[in-house]
Amino acid sequence: MGNQKFVESEEYDLRYSTVGDLDPLRAWLKIRGMLHWFPPGDDQELENFARMWIGFCRHNAALTATYKESPVGMGSLYLMPYRKVAHQCMFQLIVDPDYQKRGVGHSLVKNLKHLAKTQFRQEYMYVEIFDEKSPLIDLLKELDFTEFARQEKYVKEGDQYFSRILMGSFLK
Amino acid sequence: MIEESILEDRELFKRLLLQPGVLEYFPMFDMREIDDAVRIWEIFARQKASLTAVKDGNRCGIAFLNLQGYKKLAHQCLLTIAVDEAFRNQGIGTELLRELCILAKEKFKLEMIHLEVYETNPAKRLYEREGFTEFGMHPEFIKEPTRYINKIFMQKTL
């Protein structure tokens, strides 16, 4: 099934994330190689990271993509607690490797932008990317995100370093 | 003189944040947010990652390392610095920054240190002088009633 067909099929849907989505989120993060794209490096860090992510579902600030009612991807707005910076937020995104390259990430980011703008009156949304080779970069460019910072050697895995790329998009 | 902060310096940090104009250069807005920031400072102070400047018996500045919680990011961290308005332009910021870099490199084995400074903050010149270089700018990071302020990212290899 092509990208467009997959996310337009009746069996594909988006809903607010729930606390129950912690299980698939944790499972995806545990897939070999997945943590390369995220800050955690071990099981304890993964657990804390996943719980923080899922915590935003209490504010209806996280979305889950489903196919045949099973989660295939998630995205969450990390709303800022301080008033002067509450007009902009970071987000996180993950797609089940079995459903990547089918438009799920595009659909999630597009809808997160809409959610951020309409429900939370966000004016700017950004993401941290932990490897300049991330496939997320091209996806974000399609959705009007531009790079605003690049920090070399921000991530260190063993003796290898990776850059942090920050990309953002105005929502106003 | 620069010394390791003590937990009682929480009052100093709070006092510095409450001085006129200081919050223009920090994300906090009200007492609840300041108290939250002071609680976060305590976490780093307990890890011995905070330094206090003392001049003629007056505790007059604080600089600390926001040590990273994630292991693969733990070779670098963000820093925060604040100097009492009555003691500015006397080299205290420079001394704090230099000692903090030494602490970062020698005690915490950090390879890189970075900071975030709003474009309106004159302290940016101090950071440039001390070898920090820009690597990006977060547009309209701060929203005030009549204006937006960009945030500049700077870093220094240790």
Image (cartoon, coloured by chain):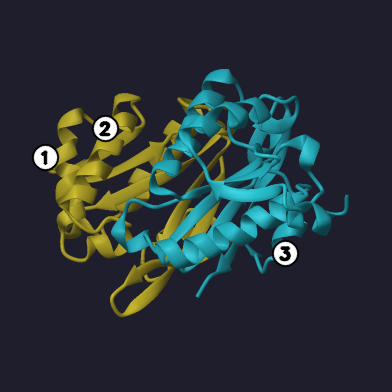
Q: Which mark is residue B42?
A: 2
Amino acid type, label 1 = Gly
Q: Which chain can be seen in cyan?
A: A
Estimate the spatial distance between the alpha carbons at disc 2 and disc 3, rounded to whole Å. 40 Å
Residue A42: image x %, image y %? 60, 21
Work out whether disc 1 and disc 2 sit on a shared chain. yes
A88 or B153, which is in the foreground?
A88
Horizontal side, residue B125 vs residue B156: left or right: left
Amino acid type, label 3 = Lys
Chain under numbered label 3: A
Residue A118, can we see it? yes
Q: Which chain can be seen in yellow?
A: B
Residue B4 location, quadrant: top left
Chain under numbered label 2: B
- Which callout, 1 or 2, points at the residue further toward the start of the chain? 2
Residue ranking furthest to the left: B57
Amino acid type, label 2 = Glu
Callout 2 touching callout 3 (CB < 8 Å): no
